Structure formats: C-alpha cells, structure tokens
Amino acid sequence: MFPKINPTNTQAWLLLKRHYDEEMQRTHLRKLFAADPERFKKFSLSFDDILFDYSKNIINSKSLQLLFQLAEECRLGDGIQAMFDGEKINETENRSVLHVALRNFSGRPYNSDGQNGYLFLQILA
C-alpha cells in the first residue's frame, strides 16, 4: 500500500526546519567549499556516464542525514516499492504509474491492472 504521510507532520521536518533556521540559512556556498576540499567528492555520485552533483547546494552532512530521516519517516521506500509493484498510486487517474514500464529493459513484464504495462503503453501511443 502506498503510504500517505504529510512530510510537514514528521519529526524530521521539524529538525530540518530548525537546522535551516539555526545553521544553514546564513551559510554561503563559498564557505562550505572553503571549509571542505573534499566537498565535491562527498556530495556527488557517478553512474556510468551520469554525474549527479549536489555539492553546489547549501547542505552539509547533517542536512543529508536529516533528509534521509525524512525519507524514512515518510516511508519513501514503501512508496517506491508500490510503484514497482504496479499499485495504483496515481490517484488522479486511479491507476498505477507507468514510469517503470517506460524504462523497463529487463525483459520482465511490468504489470498494471493485470496487464503488461509496456504493452499498455504501446496501445496508448
């Protein structure tokens, strides 16, 4: 079941807000880079030829820890699993989302309402 948790009602949200108000609001990016020569290495990810650089955001290790806590409290993992399981998480259209079917190169069917979602997308096209 897709979790319905308002992130602003979590403990992590309150901690993030306090962290921003007390520490990050007046922090400048130049200061963060000057204080940590390894900042790019710590706050970026690479996968094949894709680079995800989030070092140029006003965050620190505590910010990241609190964001992970927020994701956990909101049960983001359960929501991701619901998407991959083909659950109806698109409430507007009362159906599963087909993002996974669009990017499915595994050869395994992605079922949505008992139908192969990839084939369903081809019919819609």
Image (tube, helix red, strand yellow):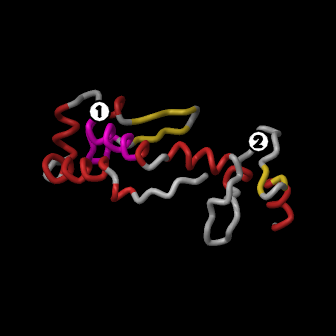
Task: Give the camera-side residue of 121 and 72.
Answer: 72
Q: Position of residue 124 (x, y in %)?
A: 82, 67
Q: Position of residue 23 (x, y in %)?
A: 15, 46
Residue 62 included in the magenta stretch of the image:
yes
Q: Label 2 sits on what residue type? A: Phe
Kindly report the distance in space between the C-alpha atoms of the residues bearing marks 1 and 2.
34 Å
Residue at the bottom extreme, as displayed:
92
Instruction: Answer with the quarter of the image where residue 56 lies.
Output: top left
Relative side of 119 to 83, left or right: right
Quadrant into which the C terminus falls: bottom right
Q: Is residue 115 above or below residue 70?
A: below
**Residue at the spot of label 1:** 39
Q: Are marks 1 and 2 in contact (CB under 8 Å)?
A: no
Q: Label 1 sits on what residue type? A: Arg
**Residue name at image x 30 percent, y 49 percent:** 11
Relative side of 104 to 44, left or right: right
Q: Position of residue 104 (x, y in %)?
A: 74, 45
**Residue at the spot of label 2:** 105
**Residue name at image x 83 percent, y 60 percent:** 120
Mark 1 Cα within 10 Å, few/some/many (few <14, many 20+)?
A: some
Relative side of 80 to 59, left or right: right
Q: Which residues are magenta?
A: 55-70
